[in-house]
Image (tube, grey):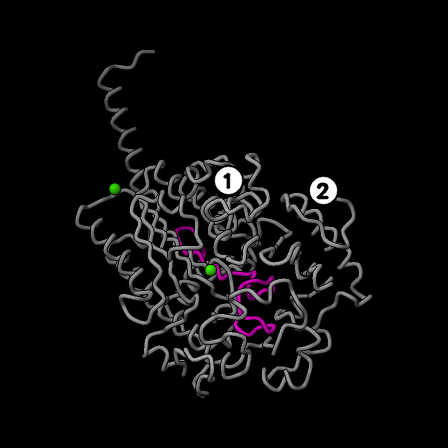
């Protein structure tokens, strides 16, 4: 049947109207990422924490909190680098390039495992092609340079000082100026803003006001200890004076050479450094508040998905460690919040997500086709309350020091960590029930001198259960899940007690 021309024309017009209306309604994305931040710093994960983050607390109350969000790990001491490659590409840890083709990932020689043109299929490039306006600000270095420059507007610089120009306010200023320009030009395209901070990564130079609030000083003299101050946050629950065994990378820069900490793990040093971390994290919170206020004033807030996370956690005295080169929960896990249309306010889920799932999820939320190179799983069904998790088993690796190094696997409440350090003859296994022992207390945490400093006396069950015959079945299951995950994810190593070479 031939439609009369006028009817055709008006149908076409209607179609155009509908499609342009849809385009205008496509949601914006504000992706916020901090550098080196433990989930346990936040009240929404650890109600006893002294860190004040009213803006993020509100985001948590108005959105969804993820209790089991992880970065998959690292084959480099610079854990930031693979983490940011995974965020940008949606690929797993053994399937991404290293910085400037340093071949830190042994699989990098394989074009099948690590596609040579991957940067063209990363977050900025994908959303540019989909008609989004893309902008980013973040730290420079230990990142994914080829992917970062895919964003149309880029204002990257490392800002770890205590002033507006040298610290976190600088990153917020870039976003605010970008939003101002959009407002002036009445730009109605949807946007993706990658809003990254350089803090609370060391050097943790806070502002004078926020340092005073947390009783901390920007301590820079390795020959003295920072002053004790009652306003400083208490010691971390799972502090130890030193890690109980060589984990394969105890001499890495983060463990021995962070200004303000160095090799010290004493109470004065750790409490001061946690105070500095909190001063930097509260400043980030203030800066996020400015951007959210601006989005609200522009009328964009309700049509924006806001993600908040960090590239990985950090120890700062927990388990006798200082850095991010370990697989305990304080470091393997990340804070993770999402707020936006269709997400139930005040909801909380495990999620069982990796940072590498973010790209797929952003695509799913905006109706954008994910790139073929993506390996992440969209957790949109979790955001919309249809399911609580996207997977059952989580795998982690730290392989930036001696190899094979550390591996972990988690299923439900149970977590296994293994350490294979041939030169030190270390073959250690740890088994934790995280429901009973969320801080992964070890036998050393039970020693009276340790409990006196941390103020916590763990229960008998709160310890490493790897050699406890009552949990042999759990250990056996996790050992086999770990080996299966290592194989599935093309981990090029085999641990000392794993059978069969790959
Ligand atoms: Ca980092
Ligand atoms: Ca535009």
Question: Is residue 265 rendered to the left or right of residue 298?
Answer: right
Looking at this view, name the residue that lies furthest to the left: 184
Determine the residue positioned at 40% across, 44% down: 146
* Image quadrant in which you'd find residue 162: bottom left
Looking at this view, name the residue that lies furthest to the right: 469
Dot 1 surroundings within 10 Å: few (below 14), some, or many (20 or more)? many
Q: Is residue 321 magenta?
A: yes
- Residue 388 position in % (x across, y down): 57, 53
> 485 or 391, which is in the foreground?
485
- Type of secondary structure dominating the magenta stretch: loop
Dot 2 surroundings within 10 Å: few (below 14), some, or many (20 or more)? few
Alpha carbon distance from label 2 to label 1: 24 Å
- Residue 283 position in % (x across, y down): 35, 70
Region of the chain picked out in magenta, as a range: 315-344
Question: Is residue 48 rendered to the left or right of residue 185?
Answer: right
Pointer 1: what residue?
Answer: 374
Q: The C terminus appears in which quarter of the rendering?
A: top right
- Residue 368 position in % (x across, y down): 41, 38
* Image quadrant in which you'd find residue 152: top left
Determine the residue positioned at 44% across, 56% down: 338
- Residue 428 position in % (x across, y down): 72, 64
- SS at circle 2: loop
> 19 or 259, which is in the foreground?
259
Determine the residue positioned at 56% across, 39% down: 109
Q: Is residue 228 magenta?
A: no
């Amino acid at each position: 049947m031939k439609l009369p021309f006028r009817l055709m024309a008006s149908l076409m017009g209607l179609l155009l109207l509908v499609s342009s209306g849809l385009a205008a309604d496509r949601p914006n994305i504000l992706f916020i990422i901090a550098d080196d931040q433990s989930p346990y710093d936040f009240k929404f994960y650890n109600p006893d924490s002294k860190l004040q983050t009213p803006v993020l607390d509100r985001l948590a109350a108005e959105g969804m909190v993820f209790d089991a969000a992880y970065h998959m790990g690292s084959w480099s001491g610079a854990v930031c680098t693979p983490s940011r490659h995974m965020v940008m590409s949606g690929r797993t840890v053994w399937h991404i390039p290293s910085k400037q083709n340093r071949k830190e990932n042994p699989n990098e020689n394989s074009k099948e495992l690590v596609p040579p043109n991957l940067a063209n299929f990363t977050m900025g490039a994908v959303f540019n092609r989909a008609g989004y306006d893309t902008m980013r600000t973040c730290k420079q270095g230990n990142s994914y340079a080829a992917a970062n420059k895919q964003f149309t507007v880029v204002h990257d610089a490392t800002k770890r000082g205590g002033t507006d120009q040298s610290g976190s306010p600088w990153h917020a200023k870039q976003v605010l100026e970008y939003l101002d320009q959009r407002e002036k030009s009445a730009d109605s395209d949807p946007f993706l803003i990658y809003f990254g901070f350089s803090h609370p990564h060391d050097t943790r130079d806070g502002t004078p006001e926020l340092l005073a609030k947390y009783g901390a000083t920007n301590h820079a003299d390795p020959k003295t200890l920072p002053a004790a101050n009652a306003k400083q946050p208490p010691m971390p629950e799972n502090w130890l004076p030193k890690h109980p065994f060589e984990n394969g990378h105890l001499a890495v820069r983060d463990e021995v050479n962070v200004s303000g900490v160095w090799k010290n793990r004493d109470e004065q040093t750790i409490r001061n450094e946690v105070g500095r971390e909190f001063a930097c994290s509260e400043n980030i919170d203030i800066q996020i508040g400015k951007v959210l206020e601006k989005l609200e004033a522009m009328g964009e807030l309700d049509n924006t998905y806001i993600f908040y996370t960090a590239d990985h956690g950090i120890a700062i005295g927990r388990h006798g460690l200082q850095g991010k080169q370990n697989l305990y929960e304080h470091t393997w896990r990340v804070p993770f919040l999402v707020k936006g249309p269709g997400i139930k306010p005040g909801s909380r889920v495990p999620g069982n997500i990796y940072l590498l799932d973010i790209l797929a999820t952003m695509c799913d939320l905006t109706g954008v086709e994910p790139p073929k190179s993506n390996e992440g799983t969209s957790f949109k069904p979790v955001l919309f309350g249809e399911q609580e998790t996207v997977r059952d088993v989580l795998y982690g690796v730290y392989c930036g020091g001696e190899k094979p190094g550390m591996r972990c696997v988690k299923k439900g409440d149970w977590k296994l960590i293994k350490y294979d350090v041939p030169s030190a003859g270390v073959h250690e296994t740890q088994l934790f029930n995280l429901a009973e022992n969320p801080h992964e207390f070890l036998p050393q945490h039970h020693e009276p001198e340790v409990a006196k400093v941390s103020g916590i006396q763990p229960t008998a069950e709160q310890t490493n259960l790897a050699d406890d015959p009552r949990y042999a079945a759990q250990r056996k299951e996790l050992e086999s899940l770990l080996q299966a995950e290592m194989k599935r994810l093309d981990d090029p190593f085999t641990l000392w007690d794993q059978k069969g070479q790959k």
